[in-house]
Image (cartoon, helix red, strand yellow):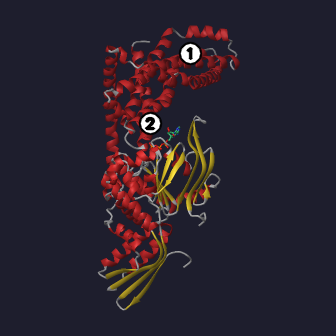
């Protein structure tokens, strides 16, 4: 054969001789497997089998194992087996693989109706776990807060400032840009549709109420959940993976107090600030469009805005922000703490953090809407 | 296959490596030859740059100056096909294992094999168990995940993965650290068996004096960014260099020799 491995066979009465030659190495493993498989399938009835490996140019664990596998399957037929021509060097290798036990079947879970149902059940049960996790974390946080209030020296101001920079200051450009654009779009759409009724000027009402009450805070909270919630989960998760959190705990630090509290405080300060900036940017964008596209002069816009909205609208928006910050922060930290050893788990929990964060933000907004409606605001 | 005439499987010339834009120069004009079929032990104080040298040879750390040839291929100028051909022929054990955390032990070991060889699932599984056996692990470990292993087991699995394709050259960064003495001894035996049978070349960074005595053919010492001495263990012991003297004649060294 052209440089590849070969396994020739010769039968003589009840004796079978197999002559292996060429390189029996990993590189030729696919060919070797075929060669060995052919002999195994042949199902020889020979009483005596000789495997001659003296012509084997090179042997490694793949080759040694395949020779071993061959001799095992031949031994099963009850033949008397002899391996000839094994050099001293290679025989240590064959001895090494001879110790391999019959392989246990790898568990590859079959896809059954039962398994599918089980998975569905488990993921439903996990929703409960999330809620418990959140309540648990809230409790731990309140406790940490109480500790810090009693011992103000344990408050980590540097850490809070650091996270404030990350979640608030560095988020300003993107938050302002996106809310500005959304403001523009709302105004443009409003003008386009209201114009048909000659109600152009009500665009200002809509813009003011919508932005200050709902869109501003909701949009910013969703952006923060995507931006900072994921970062929190990834940071805490990778610390968890590398036993850093365990290390902290053994040094007598409370990870909640050291890691989680500063992050959540930073969010509680940062999110309202971003909400304010976002609302202003959206109003500015809307005003700009109203002027350039709708011909509403800035003075008219401002006058109308003053009539249309009251401080209540602004306050309602702002009041919601810290609560959303707490929800985003807690969900992100709970997910971070749930990360287990693998990179995959880190990815899953980071995704879950963002998805749940956004979900809870919207649920929260709905609850606030009902609440404010019932107190008549 | 193209190999340099004098059979140096790794050849490093005037290698300089810096970090932080020249703030720390870790390697400074380093020269080193690793011969085909030898086990080279690489020693040096902690932080001397042993891991950095290893990572530079395998192309993970960019170099400032110098030439590196592995299997006669200059990795700096090789195209991606040539690089891949070289990468198929070596196996690497990182200092911290570097197992893929989202794959099970079985999948970790099979990963390189699947990439390069078209073989049946059955053979893959058998080879996995064989490799696990060679590094002293039971088949039951195969379906665990790296986070469920002890430190020493991680080392062993990482070694099994490095050996998965039966490479010609292996880089081992502190393979025996984290192993119990018996396991470390078995490991040295395994390295010697593979060297004898497969003609394996081993580049081994180690602090383990036992390994140096039993498994290594030659020892190279790194100091001040250079190889300050290369030779057999006897030559190292006879050296008058102060660091070598305290290394090979210190309290721990005496305990090994006697
Ligand atoms: N990515 C990096 N950036 C900056 N400096 C680095 C980097 N990697 C390594 N170093 C520095 O290079 C030096 C050598 O590190 P290296 O990891 O090679 O040490 P070592 O000899 O392997 O030590 P040990 O025996 O403890 O493993 C150290 O001073 C380290 O701080
Ligand atoms: Mg190192």
Mark 2 or mark 1: which comes first in sequence?
1
**Closest to the observer: A208 or A152?**
A152
**Which residue corresponds to mark 2?**
A350
Q: Is residue B215 above or below residue A258?
A: below
Q: Tag 1's secondary structure?
A: helix
Q: Is residue B4 above or below residue A270?
A: below
Q: Position of residue B95 (x, y in %)?
A: 44, 47
Quadrant the C terminus of chain B occupies: bottom left
**Which residue corresponds to mark 1?**
A208
Q: Position of residue A135 (x, y in %)?
A: 32, 27
Q: Tag 2's secondary structure?
A: helix
**Residue B199 shows in this picture:** yes
Q: Position of residue A315 (x, y in %)?
A: 47, 12
Taking the spot 37% from the left edge, 41% from the top edge, the residue there is: A340
Quadrant the N terminus of chain B occupies: bottom right
Q: Is residue A166 left or right of residue B160?
A: right
């Amino acid at each position: 054969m052209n440089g590849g491995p070969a396994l020739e066979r010769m039968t003589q009465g009840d004796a079978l001789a197999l002559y292996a030659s060429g390189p029996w190495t990993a590189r030729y493993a696919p060919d070797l497997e075929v060669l060995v498989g052919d002999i195994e399938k042949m199902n020889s009835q020979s009483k005596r089998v000789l495997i001659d490996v003296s012509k084997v140019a090179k042997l490694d664990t793949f080759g040694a194992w395949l020779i071993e596998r061959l001799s095992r399957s031949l031994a099963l037929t009850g033949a008397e087996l002899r391996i000839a021509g094994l050099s001293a060097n290679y025989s240590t290798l064959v001895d090494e693989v001879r110790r391999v036990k019959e392989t246990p079947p790898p568990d590859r879970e079959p896809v059954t109706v039962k398994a599918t149902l089980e998975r569905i059940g488990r993921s439903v049960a996990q929703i409960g776990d999330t809620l418990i996790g959140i309540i648990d974390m809230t409790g731990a946080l309140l406790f940490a807060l109480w500790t810090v209030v009693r011992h103000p020296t344990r408050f980590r101001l540097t850490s809070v400032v650091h996270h404030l920079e990350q979640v608030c200051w560095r988020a300003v450009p993107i938050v302002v840009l996106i809310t500005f654009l959304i403001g523009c779009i709302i105004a443009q759409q409003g003008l386009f549709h209201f114009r048909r009724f000659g109600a152009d000027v009500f665009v200002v009402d809509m813009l003011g109420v919508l932005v200050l009450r709902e869109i501003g805070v909701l949009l910013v909270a969703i952006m923060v959940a995507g931006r900072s919630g994921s970062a929190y989960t990834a940071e805490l998760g990778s610390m968890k993976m590398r036993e850093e959190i365990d290390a902290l705990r053994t040094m007598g630090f409370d990870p909640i107090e050291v890691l989680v509290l500063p992050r959540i405080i930073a969010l509680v300060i940062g999110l309202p600030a971003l909400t304010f900036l976002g609302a202003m940017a959206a109003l500015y964008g809307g005003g700009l469009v109203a002027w350039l596209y709708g011909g509403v002069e800035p003075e008219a816009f401002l006058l109308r805005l003053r009539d249309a909205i009251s401080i209540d609208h602004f306050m309602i928006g702002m009041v919601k922000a810290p609560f959303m910050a707490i929800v985003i922060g807690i969900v992100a930290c709970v997910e971070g703490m749930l990360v287990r050893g693998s990179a995959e788990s880190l990815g899953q929990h980071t995704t879950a953090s963002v998805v749940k964060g956004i979900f809870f933000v919207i649920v929260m907004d709905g609850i606030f809407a009902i609440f404010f409606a019932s107190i008549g605001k | 296959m193209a190999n340099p005439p004098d059979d140096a499987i790794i050849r490093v010339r005037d290698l300089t490596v810096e970090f932080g834009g020249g703030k720390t120069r870790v390697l400074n004009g380093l020269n080193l030859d690793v011969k085909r079929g030898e086990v080279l032990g690489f020693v040096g104080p902690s932080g001397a740059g042993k891991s950095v040298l290893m990572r530079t040879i395998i192309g993970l750390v960019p170099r400032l100056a110098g030439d590196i040839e592995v299997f006669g291929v200059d990795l700096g100028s090789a195209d991606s096909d040539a690089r891949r051909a070289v990468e198929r022929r070596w196996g690497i054990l990182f200092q911290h294992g570097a197992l893929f955390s989202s794959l099970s032990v079985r999948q970790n070991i099979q990963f390189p094999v699947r990439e390069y060889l078209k073989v049946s699932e059955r053979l893959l599984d058998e080879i996995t168990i064989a490799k696990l056996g060679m590094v002293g692990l039971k088949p039951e470990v195969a379906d665990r995940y790296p986070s469920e292993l002890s430190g020493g087991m991680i080392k062993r699995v990482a070694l099994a993965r490095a050996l998965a394709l039966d490479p010609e050259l292996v880089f081992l960064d502190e393979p025996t650290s984290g192993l119990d003495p018996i396991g470390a001894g078995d490991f040295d035996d395994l390295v010697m068996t593979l060297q004898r049978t497969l003609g394996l070349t081993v580049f081994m960074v180690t602090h383990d004096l036992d390994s140096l005595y039993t498994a290594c053919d030659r020892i190279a010492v790194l100091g001040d960014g250079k190889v300050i001495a290369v030779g057999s263990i006897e030559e190292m012991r006879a050296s008058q260099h102060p660091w070598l003297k305290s290394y090979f004649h210190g309290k721990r060294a005496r305990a090994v020799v006697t």
